[in-house]
Image (cartoon, rainbow, N blue to C red):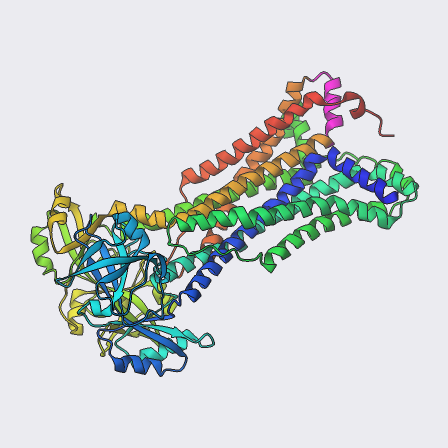
Amino acid sequence: MVKQMLTKKLFRDMWAAKWQFLSIILLTALGVMLFVGLDAGWRDINLSLNNYFTQQKLPDLWVSSGDVDQATISKIETIEGVKSTQTRGSYEALAKDLPNDPTVMLNAFDGEMEINQPVLIKGKMLAKNDTRGGLIEEKFAKAQGLKLGDTIKCTLQNMEYDFLIKGMIRSPEYIMSANDIMPNAKRFGYMYVNSASLTLPLNEVLVSVEKTTDSDRVKKQIEKAFPAATIQDRSVHRSTDTIFTEVQQFKSFSYVFPVLFFIVAALVVLTTISRMVDNQRTQMGILKALGYSRQKLYVHYLSYGFFPSLIGSLLGLLIGKTLVADVLWRAEEGIYTMPTHYAAPISILSFLVSILSILLAVGICFFSCRKQLKETAADLLRPKPPKSGTRIILERFTQLWGKMSFHSKLISRNMFRAKIRSFMALFGVLSCTALLISAFAMDNSFSSLVNVYYGETYTYDIKAKLEQNPGSIESYKKRVPAETVEGIMERPVSLSHDGESRAINMTIVDNHQTIIHFSDEHTQLPDEGVVITEKLAETMGVSKNQSVEITLSGDKRPIKTFIADFASFGTGQGIFLSRKSWDRMGKGNFIPTSLLIKNPETNISEYLNRTDTIARWSTVDTQIAETLVLMDSMRGVILLLGLFALLLAFVVIYNMGILNFVERTREFATLKVLGYYNYEIRSLIMRENTILSFLGVMLGIIPGILLANVALRVAEPEDFVISIAIKPISIVLSCVITFAFSIIVQLFLTRKVAKIDMVSALKSVE
């Protein structure tokens, strides 16, 4: 019976203060939802990819060499830790019979595809002796209008090969199917064929490593045995590296932003529950007088925090795990060729965060009611005497105080005397502003990185990829209709220093080039040595003038050189050297692989399209747009963060407004008796809240910039240097959105002035 009565009272209290309880539910849900959503998002992607890679036997290492023979394979297989190997030939071909002359990556397997097995979507797998059939990428086939039974003609090293499409596939090594910045099925695809279909040598070994073996150790042993080989592991292979970099960013974000939400939620819950328990003082006295034990009363009042936080945590777990994680997955699907979606179980960390949210609310309840429950029933039945009025700090400045209007004095006294409530309202607005500014700052920083790279580091208008044996750069300078034409030679190489090696990109530039800016001061490269990007130098621990070795694919004699200088690149980490430096190394002629074109004439597209030695070309605007699309998943997280910031602001501002109104009902009723109209009282409330909102917005600017800087540092990928760059308009927009949102919520709240019950509000407290 006793338990039943307290339960009824609990539900009545919750209904009477439904908006305060709802705010606790929402605040708890928001904090848990954001953490669980980001946590589940990266775990789902990570689990799905790892399952996919395991099932389809993605290699651990890709070993590229000029010509792979049986002796090479046998030597690799004898290395401790190597589980199995697979040889193949990998070559870029052109499908000139298809629109846009797309590039087709031909992967010619020697024997059964035991490693890197593709997923068959349609058709059938190739037989061992099938020299005419091919398995084509499903996305590429759809984009090109190809179907089973069609023939695709590929041109490779001045030879033509016809392949009959036997099946459509998806491959684990082409999560990101692209030979440029952004996947484009109209421009690039891949095909798997048997090695007997080509007359070219095998040039790549796929290596699978034992689970108990460190792949880095195996990689170093292969490098030692085959110094001429270029070796990539999953951490640098473009497809796997790109997607796992984003997974790491999601993981980093899940530890940064929810912290602020929980801090705000804790402070608001503390204020809300403290006020609610204080308002229950008389009822505590009645219950004590009726014989209820302190233990039962503790359980009853702890329920004020337990049930709302429990509901909020469960909602946060459910919505975060399903909705938020699904949004992140769909964002990745828009860019990558994702495998089957496996939902990872809710992590222990997510459960811990949910439990801590509940314990936090319950703990606040405990400390709020502990002091009052120690008092006797007689003391509790007497309302707590009001605090004696004290002079606020402004009253000490008599001249200023004397010039202030009555309304200004009233507002000032209320703000200074209700310090906790004022601080909470201010802190809520500050937090919302900081979150919005950090969201805008990160978006601006990503955009700035791309724009600086393609506008200040590289200053070309068009980049044209050349075919093999394209001719001299001097001939292009004469023929291409443009003001400036420069050639670069790009080669994948292995860079070694102090026992560590990395597969990177090496770029050789023509003498006296002007298009690539290696720093703010210069565009020229030294006649000796190489220039390394600062981030790569930091990663490898290389200093200026230190010796390094460069190994070209298929070359058994590494190039011994030194670091001449550093280059400031936001992305595209690698090494650069001048044509003179390359000639000194004696590794062949300078053969351009791409043209950088600046200030072209109007007929440039016609020229590029009809020139046989130009494989493909793109404008800088296209490259910027494609790079920004590649960052869409990160921008999706940023948009989600902005939405959560607005929800947080709504809950905090509304909750603080409700508390302010409830605590000052007697004061507002008194003003009505003194002749104030409803609109005048509403004006007083609005002026006070406007001041707090304005202060909160202004004080939130610097924390927002600092928060964005922390988030960028934590989530910065290994191949990027992201400097914080926020536009003034973004700061203004964040402040305006938060301020306007606060005013709208306050306008909604001030409507309650007309509903004040004058009789109950003005009852004597004693």
Count of all numbered marks drawn on residues in the image: 0
Q: The N terminus appears in which quarter of the rendering?
A: top right
Question: Residue 576, position in %: x, y?
Answer: 25, 64
Q: Is residue 344 magenta?
A: no
Residue 428: quarter of image:
top right
Residue 684: quarter of image:
top right
Q: Is residue 700 visible?
A: no
Question: Residue 359, position in %: x, y?
Answer: 70, 53
Of the pair 705 and 207, the residue shown nearer to us:
207
- Residue drawn where x is 45% and y is 36% of the image: 733
Question: Residue 712, position in %: x, y?
Answer: 45, 53
Q: Looking at the image, is 421 positioned above or below residue 719?
A: above
Q: Main secondary structure of the magenta part?
A: helix
Q: Looking at the image, is 304 positioned above or below residue 615?
A: above
Give the side of residue 125 with respect to residue 348, left or right.
left
Residues shaded magenta = 663-676
Q: The C terminus appears in which quarter of the rendering?
A: top right
Of the pair 239 and 375, the residue shown nearer to us:
239
Q: Looking at the image, is 99 positioned above or below residue 720?
A: above
Give the side of residue 729 with respect to residue 554, left or right.
right
- Residue drawn where x is 52% and y is 55% of the image: 343
